């Protein structure tokens, strides 16, 4: 079984490509919970775990498999944003966002 996740950037958006047995899915590398980067996430099999509040997503479907451990609930559409690259341009399955780190106060 061969699976891998690779991170890259297109047009200012951090993306991640998940390869699983010859199939590829591309996702925005951002957590929909609080729009944090997923670039330093732990990946186990098909599941990526957000390092901020522990939400887990299935990299083959984009679905949330474990909600965040946070008082702030995930927004209604708490799934990964899918990306298709067409002539090098990213097309997003819904409104994308640029993930960012929390501000220091
Ligand atoms: S930002 Fe990812 S779980 Fe909260």
Image (cartoon, helix red, strand yellow):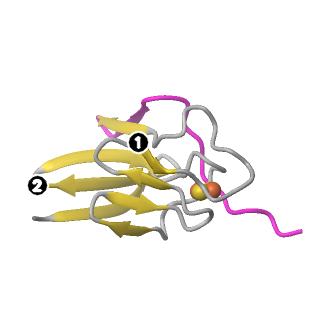
Find out whether residue 98 is within the magenta segment: yes
For label 2, the residue is: 21
Label 1 and label 2: CA atoms lie apart by: 19 Å
Closer to us: 81 or 60? 60
Characterize the local packing of mark 2: few (<14), some (14-19) or many (20 or more) Cα atoms within 10 angstroms.
few
Label 1 vs 2, first from the N-terminus: 2
Q: Quarter of the image holding residue 6?
A: bottom left
At which x and y percent is residue 68?
59, 55
Furthest toward the top, the residue is 94
Residue 61 position (above or below residue 68): above
Residue at 31% in and 53% down = 17
Is 40 left, or right, of 84 in this rendering?
right
User: Which region is colored magenta?
Assistant: 87-105
- Overall secondary structure of the magenta stretch? loop
Residue 54 position (above or below residue 73): below
Q: Find residue 52 and name its label.
A: none
Q: Find residue 63 and name its label.
A: 1
Q: Are marks 1 and 2 in contact (CB under 8 Å)?
A: no
Is 74 left, or right, of 64 in this rendering?
right
Q: Which image quarter is the C terminus in?
A: bottom right
Closer to us: 76 or 22? 76
| Mark 1, secondary structure of its residue | loop
């Amino acid at each position: 079984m061969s699976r891998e996740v690779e991170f890259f950037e297109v047009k200012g958006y951090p993306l991640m490509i998940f390869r699983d047995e010859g199939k590829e899915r591309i996702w925005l590398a951002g957590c929909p919970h609080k729009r944090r980067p997923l670039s330093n996430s732990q990946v186990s099999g098909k599941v990526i775990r957000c390092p901020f509040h522990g939400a887990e997503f299935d990299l083959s479907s984009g679905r949330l498999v474990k909600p965040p451990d946070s008082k702030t609930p995930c927004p209604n559409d708490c799934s990964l944003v899918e990306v298709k690259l067409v002539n090098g341009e990213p097309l997003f399955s819904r409104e994308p966002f640029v993930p960012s780190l929390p501000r220091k106060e």
